[in-house]
Amino acid sequence: MRGTWQGLSLGSSIVAGALAAAACSGSEKQPAAGAESTAAAPAPAAASARASLVYVSDERGNKVTVINTATDSVVKTIDAGQRPRGVRLTPDGKTLVVAVSGSPIGGPGVDESKLPPPDRSKDGIALVDLATDSMRRLQGGHDPENFDITPDGKFIYVSNEDAGKATVLDLADGKEVAKVKVGSEPEGVKVTPDGKEAWVTSEGQGTVTVIDVGSNKAIATIKVGKRPRSVVFAPDGSKGYVPAEVGGNVSVVDVKSHKVVKTLDLTKTTPGAKPMGSAISPDGKFVYITTGRGATLEVIATANESVVATIRDPKRPWGVAVTSDGSKIYTANGPSNDIAIIDAATNKVIKTVPAGDSPWGVAISR
């Protein structure tokens, strides 16, 4: 359905110099220094001409926290709606997109039968124009949790956790163009780099549904680990990585055949690992997997699909993203209400930054 524009003041401006040049000096690649590290992590690429901004959704605080990568400090907050979770930027970098929801927060230890009913008027996909701070909200189906945007910036694929479906939206006019059944409790959504397929995880069924973007029809179902939470693709689109929280593993999937070619058991390196969020280095050499209550960030070398470093990140890391030069990794740590910043050259947490109440997702401008 067509979204309506809502005028909104988004608080203080970015402080002077937030987008100033980041002063960085080149250095040789250093050996990985994280616990159980067995290989060197990628060295930082050349310094970007401008600092990037990190956008962190704050599920309980109903905000998006904005962090400047040059100083790793908070420069503003954005009010995008209730219970923000999935967060991304459009391919042109001009619009912040946030999944917001009127469903009450459940999770481990919560008796969901005693939760209040959902407020569907709060469900939606918020689009924040970063130049004007104006916002419009699209109808994105029941309980939007996560989403991805096609590389051409035309369509959004949204996981509707309560409905067991994915909603497809036209980004230009906000109209719903399709609904696709994808299995119970869908969460992770990722479009392949070529824009031809959208993959949606089903936590309830332990599967990934592959949607053909051209027809918006489900064309394959891939069996992966128990309770898959996210998907990330190699930059060339050849492989997908699917972490499974309850399974304690990561499925490596051949994209062309839709077949699992390897399963990595992360509990061997981190007992109690609950694989959740996923990101990949810009050069495609390393995949980063957060382990939730396992309290680590696992580094997988894609050359041989093996864990090469384990980084202690003690407060249930979930969302994760990598800067465009590959030099730093940011993880959202819900229970400690902060963001951990990790140096990819040394595999060490170099700083933590407060980020509201229950930070969930992370997106970084390019």
Image: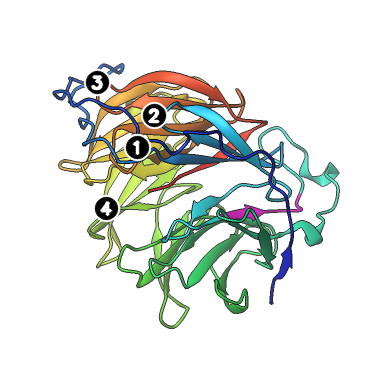
Badges 3 and 1: C-beta atoms under 8 Å apart? Answer: no
**Comes first in the chain, label 3 or label 1:** 3
Separation of marks 2 and 1 at Cα, in angstroms? 7 Å
The picture places residue 7, in percent across and down from the top left corner, at 74, 59
Question: Which residue is more in the foreground, 242 or 351?
Answer: 351
Q: Is residue 301 left or right of residue 95?
A: left
Does the magenta-highlighted stretch encompass residue 102?
yes
What distance separates the C-alpha of mark 3 from that of mark 1? 14 Å
Quickly name the residue at label 3. 37
Residue at 65 percent across and 31 percent down: it is 356
Element under disc 1:
strand
Q: Amino acid at mark 3?
A: Ser
Residue 247 seen in this snapshot: no
Residue type of the residue flagged with mark 2:
Leu
**Sequence-first disc among 4 and 1:** 4
Please report whichever mark, 4 or 2, sits nearer to the chain's N-terminal start: 4
Span colored in magenta: 97-103
Cβ atoms under marks 4 and 3 closer than 8 Å: no
**Mark identifier at residue 234:** 4
Q: Which residue is mark 1?
A: 288
CA–CA distance in space, label 4 to label 3: 22 Å
Q: Residue 219's spot in the image, x, y percent? A: 40, 76
Where is mark 2, residue-wise?
A: 297
Q: Position of residue 305 (x, y in %)?
A: 21, 41
